[in-house]
Amino acid sequence: MDPEGKKPKMVRRNEAGVGDNLPNRGYLDGQLLIAMPVMGDPRFERSVIYLCAHSSEGAMGIIVNRPAGSIDFPELLVQLDIIKKADQIKLPVNAESMKVLKGGPVDTGRGFVLHTSDFFIKDATLRIDDDICLTATVDILKAIARGAGPKHAILALGYAGWAPGQLENEIQDNGWLHCDADPDLIFGGDVEEKYLRALRKIGIDPGVLSNEAGHA
């Protein structure tokens, strides 16, 4: 379910692969965006975003540090008819502990799984770099439920999207810092601490962070 109480939509295998609707690779894809204090949009305040795609056609990313409230991954599997309620106690550790996040304000009724590259579904998984992939089909949830999924993964409801040139303009206007991706920042369990950790990763003391643009 999304914040409005709807179930997340996961694409079936016979539908178009996730990569069909994403911009071509390029620019800052595979990097982390870190919101600056001057970020005027409350939807992205103190957010850390993994950029899945970025090109002249726009950009798409997943917020990795915003919990989706009380939504529980095992219960989500029951709602999607992937497992029976009685089987919740039989789930592997990875499934029991998997984080459900608010991935962004776009398409919040749809689920996106950001995961390590040790799991791949042909025509459904988007390989972002050597270590990170994105899959939006129910098959990956089924695999996680039976213990055959990726080593590390997060489920995001919705995503962040930018029109052509929009992200570049926001960076120019001091809205974002960016740096190389860190798997621990993406998949780590201390969700609320990721923003401060991301700033420290690029050598910035959050207490003295200025409003000037900066890039790592």
Image (cartoon, rainbow, N blue to C red):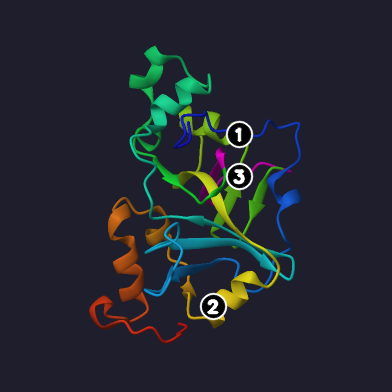
Q: Which residues are drawn in magenta?
A: 108-123
Residue under numbered circle 2? 171
Q: Residue at x 66, y 52 (%)?
A: 126
Per the image, label 3 sits on a secondary structure element best described as strand
Is tag 2's residue or tag 3's residue first in the polypeptide sequence?
3
**Residue 113 forms part of the magenta stretch:** yes
Residue 117 seen in the current view: no
Between disc 2 and disc 1, the foreground one is: 2
* Mark 3 in CB contact with mark 1 (< 8 angstroms): no
- Classify residue 170 by image quadrant: bottom right
Of labels 2 and 3, the one closer to you: 2
Q: Position of residue 175 (x, y in %)?
A: 48, 75
Within 10 Å of disc 3 (Cα), the crowding (few <14, some 14-19, many 20+) is: many
Which mark identifies residue 83? none
Which quadrant of the view contains residue 212?
Answer: bottom left
The percent position of residue 120, horizontal first and vertical second, equals 62, 45
Q: Which residue is mark 3?
A: 135
